[in-house]
Image (cartoon, helix red, strand yellow):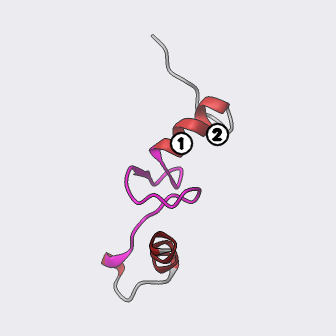
Amino acid sequence: MARKSLINKSLRKPKYMTRKVNRCRICGRPRGYMRKFQMCRICFRNLASEGKIPGVTKSSW
């Protein structure tokens, strides 16, 4: 319940722009957020390994 209310709170337009918190669009995680993809590192890794993010390939050397 508390986590869901924080997610709803972050979706509202903040009174001041410095209060804006970027959250993952999939799971709502506030940390490890990548602006380019609008998701956290964990969701990004899962979707990238499944091949669901266009233009992203697994690196190997």
On the rendered image, what quadrant is the C terminus found in? top left
| Residue holding disc 2 | 53
Labels 2 and 1 touching (C-beta < 8 A): yes
* 37 lies above or below 46: below
Residue 58 x/y as whole percent: 55, 24
- Residue shown at 43% from the left, 64% from the top: 22
- Is disc 2 placed on a helix, strand or loop? loop
> Which amino acid type corresponds to the residue marked 1 in the rendered image?
Phe
- Residue shown at 51% from the left, 58% from the top: 24
How crowded is the residue under tag 2: few (<14 C-alpha within 10 Å), some, or many (20+)? some
| Residue holding disc 1 | 44
Q: Extreme bottom residue here? A: 15
* 12 lies above or below 43: below
Q: Nearer the viewer, residue 4 or 9?
A: 4
Mark positioned earlier in the residue sequence (2 or 1): 1
> Which amino acid type corresponds to the residue marked 2 in the rendered image?
Ile
**Magenta range:** 19-41
Q: Label 2 vs label 1: CA separation?
A: 8 Å
Indicate which label's residue lies in the foreground, 2 or 1. 1
Q: Nearer the viewer, residue 56 or 8?
A: 8
